[in-house]
Image (tube, grey):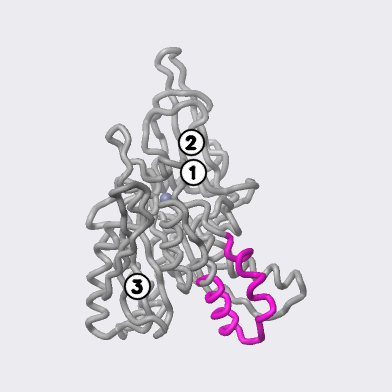
Amino acid sequence: MQRIDHALLSPSLGSRKTVTSFHFGKPGSGPKVYIQASLHAEELPGMLVAYHLRPLLEAAEAAGQFCGEVVLVPVSNPIGLSQRLDHKPMGRFEIDTSENFNRHYPDFARAVLPVIEGQLGADANANVALVRKAMADHLAAWSAQTELQSLRKTLLELAHDADIVLDLHCDCEGVMHFYCEESCWPTLAPVAHFMGSRAILLAKDSGGGPIDECLSGVWWKLADTLTARGVSHPIPQACCSTTIELRGELDVNHAFASQDAQALFACLEHFGVVQTGHVPVVPAPLCQPTPLAGSETLRTVGAGVVTFAAEPGHALRIGDLVAEVIDPIENTVHQVRAGVDGVLYARIRDRYVTAGCELGKIAGAHAFRTGPLLGD
Ligand SMILES: [Zn+2]
C-alpha cells in the first residue's frame, strides 16, 4: 500500500488542507477501481466503511492477490468536514460559495472531443487510452483558482482513468440505495446486489455535474456525439461509476460498516481486481431498477412538526399515508400521501419543516419528471 498526501490550494495564509489517497495493487496490472467516501462531508458511513475495507485490501495485497489497482480515499472532502456553524456540521455546500461539493464537475466530453476527434481508430482499447490521455492533459492544464476547485481537480486526477468508480454517500435517513447512469448499469448491477440495494435509480445525465456522472458521462456522450456525426469508431463505456447511498446519516456503526466493506471486497473479487481463488456468487436482487425520473419527492405545503407514518424501506401504494405535518397553533394536521407506488427509500432527519420542505422520496417505476433530477 502506498499513501499519498495531496495538498490542496491554500485559501488563506497559514492554512492548507490535504486529501490522502491509499493505493493498493499495481497500476496497469488489471482493472482500476476508485473508491471515495464522504464527499458530502456529513455523510459519514462511507468513512467507516473505508476504515473496515482497508485491512481487507492490505491482507489481499500481502497475499499477492491483486490483479489490478484500488485507490481508496476515505476522506474525500476535508474542506466540508471542517465546516461547522452553530455547532452543526456543514458538509454539503462550501460555505464560501454555497456550491454543492458534488456538483459542477467538468464536462470532459466537450473538453476532449476536439482533441481526440481526428485520432480515433477501429481499436476500442486504443481509443480508451487516447480519451484518458486527453482527460489527463485537460486536468493538468486546469489551473485551479480556489481551494474548492483544487479539491475537484485532485479527486479527478485520482479517478479519471478508473474502470470502476464507487462514490460512497448516504441520505438523511434511508435504506441502502444506488444511483447510476443507464450505460453503467449492466456492469454495476452486481455492485448494487452485493450491497443489498433496496432502491436503484437510473438516469442518463441527471444534471448538475456530480462527480460520478462526470466520469461515466464522458464515454457515452462521446459515443453519442460521434455516432450522430456518422463516425463509427468504437468508444466503450470505459468508466462505470455509481453513487452508493449507505442508508442514513446516523447509520454509522461497525456492524453495517463491516458488512458493507465485505460487500465491496466481494465486488472487487467479482471484477477480478482481487483474486482470492473464490469468485463470490452475486446475491439475488432485492429490487428492480427504476428511473430516477420516476422518483417522487414528497413535500409539505405548510410548516409544522413532522410525524412519519412510513419507515424507510416501506413499499407504498398511491394514497398511503407517509407523514403528518402538524400545526399546534391552528390545530391542523396536513397529511402527506404517496403519489406513486414504490419504496420509500429516503426521508428527512429533522422533525420540523418549513413550507415547501422536502419530506421523503419514493422510487416510482414510471418516469414523470423532467429537467435536473438531483436535489440541491
Ligand atoms: Zn451525498
Give the residue at x 50% y 37%. Answer: 320
Q: Are marks 2 and 3 in contact (CB under 8 Å)?
A: no
Q: Is residue 14 left or right of residue 28?
A: left
Circle 1: element type: strand
Q: Are marks 1 and 2 in contact (CB under 8 Å)?
A: yes
**Residue type at tag 1:** Lys
Give the residue at x 42% y 64%. Answer: 166
Classified by dominant secondary structure, the portion drawn in magenta counts as helix
Location of residue 305 in the rendering, given as x and y in whole percent from the top left corner: 39, 25
Instruction: Please tell me whether residue 127 belongs to the stretch shown in magenta.
Output: yes
Q: Is residue 269 left or right of residue 332?
A: left
111 relative to 199, above or below: below
Residue located beneath label 1 in the image: 361
Circle 3: element type: helix
Whole-angstrom CA distance, mark 3 to mark 1, is: 29 Å
The reply to whether the residue tagged 3 has its Cβ within 8 angstroms of ligand 1 is: no
In the picture, the disc for residue 310 is none
Give the residue at x 32% y 66%. Answer: 21
Q: Residues within 10 Å of mark 3 (few under 14, many from 20)?
A: many
Query: Quarter holding the N terminus?
Result: bottom left
Task: Identify the image quadrant of residue 350.
Answer: top left
In the picture, the disc for residue 358 is 2
Residue located beneath label 3 in the image: 266
Give the residue at x 34% y 63%. Answer: 6
**Residue type at tag 2:** Glu
* Span highlighted in magenta in the image: 107-136
Whole-angstrom CA distance, mark 1 to mark 2, is: 8 Å
Label 2 vs 3, first from the N-terminus: 3
